[in-house]
Image (spheres, helix red, strand yellow):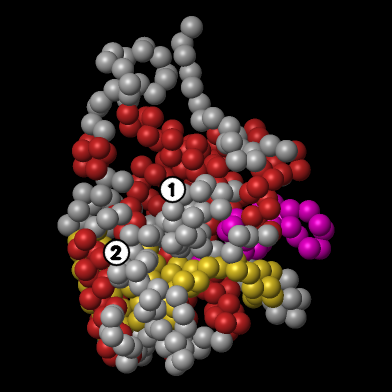
Amino acid sequence: MVNVQSIPSPTTHTEERAHEADHPSSLLALFGPDQPLHLDCGIDLAPFQIAYKTYGELNAERSNAILICHALTLDQHVANVHPLTGKLGWWETMVGPGRPLDPGRYFIICANVIGGCMGSTGPASTNPATGRLWGLDFPVITIPDMVRAQAMLLDRLGIDTLFCIVGGSMGGMQALQWTAAYPKRVFSVLAVACSTRHSAQNIAFHELGRQAVMADPDWRGGGYFEHGTHPHRGLGVARMAAHITYLSDAALHRKFGRRMQDRELPTFSFDADFQVESYLRYQGSSFVERFDANSYLYLTRAMDYFDIAADHKGVLAEAFRGIQTRVCVVSFTSDWLFPTSEARAIVHALNASSARVSFAEIETDRGHDAFLLDVPEFFDIARAFLESAGSARGLAKAGG
């Protein structure tokens, strides 16, 4: 008999994820029925909530606030222990004492996006109108919707302008949307490994992931909460497929090659004979511990719909016309998910609109995920850009 192994069931209880979706282990901003979020789909979402974390202190001039926009499968827990996984924050390479984003100098904010599952209103949240979880009754959201919600949060915090917005991947999309939608509220932007629109290839990969989730019989048409199930196999496969796009062939070869996993000879089965297979299965199983399947559908769809130029008759430069925001665009040579050609298109559009823009392409074999890893050249570029913008903004220098 041929041995077959699949992604194991998550050990984190559904109740823990559900509790975090409504009652997050972070700060919470509540917006009542009289403060709706106007969504692109034509629906006014109210009431709703935004979960967020802050690091550092807002200065007396309120001029040192930095908004971090998180990527697709991340959340507000940037530089603290994650409440579900117990792991360290996802960007502790960038955020912390002595890091480019130093809480000793900046007031750093990161909000869970609308549609997420870590405390901001989304499909895993309770619909106050019914008392049941939203599920697929939740309206489809967009990147501009996420940004409008973040703007409402900043209004609540009394922050009129941001010193900088920093984001990679989907976070970079949000940063660019901020630049186009609220140019007077943004002094500088660090946009990393991103684009102003999703490519057909990226949409295709997202559809592969969504179909994997929806093909899982435990998905139950999006109503798995009510049935006490969780489509962990489908969501795990979606994560495995997506994770391949975050890496590069060179990185996979360097890290795994064709090496066997805890054995010298093949088992002649469908077990994880190769180290790379075991790695991907681990990525899939660990992901379902902390993420909601329906949120994955909604957030990937939001990225698919993103196209800044579409709102400006297809002319990207018009989206940035007249902005005073200082922008730094960063790409990585081995990132085939958001290749350097797309970063250059952003730079060309910003140049055409006479914006202040700088660009860096970093040589690395680490693929799209390089912005989350220990890449010293990226840290140096980020630090230099923030120092330059800080000087123009009148912020005290680090250690000053």
> Is residue 264 found inside the magenta-colored segment of the image?
no
Cα–Cα span, label 1 and label 2: 17 Å
Q: Are marks 1 and 2 in contact (CB under 8 Å)?
A: no
Circle 1 is placed at which residue position?
Answer: 204
Name which residue lies at 65% across and 63% down: 121
Above or below, 230 relative to 19: above
Q: Position of residue 386 (x, y in %)?
A: 29, 78
Predominant secondary structure, magenta span: loop
Residue at (38% x, 30% y) in the render: 278
Question: SS class of the residue under badge 2?
Answer: helix
Residue 311 coordinates in the image, percent (x, y): 47, 76
Q: Residue at x 45, y 75 (%)?
A: 56
Say whether disc 1 or disc 2 marks the residue closer to the N-terminus.
1
Can residue 45 be seen in the rendering of this structure? no
Figure label count: 2
Residue 342 image label:
2
Under circle 1, the secondary element is helix
Whether residue 217 appears in this view of the structure is yes
Q: Which residues are magenta?
A: 116-143
In magenta stretch: residue 138: yes
Q: Is residue 122 above or below residue 312?
A: above
Badge 2, how many Cα within 10 Å: few under 14, some, many 20+? some
Observer-nearest residue: 274 or 181? 274
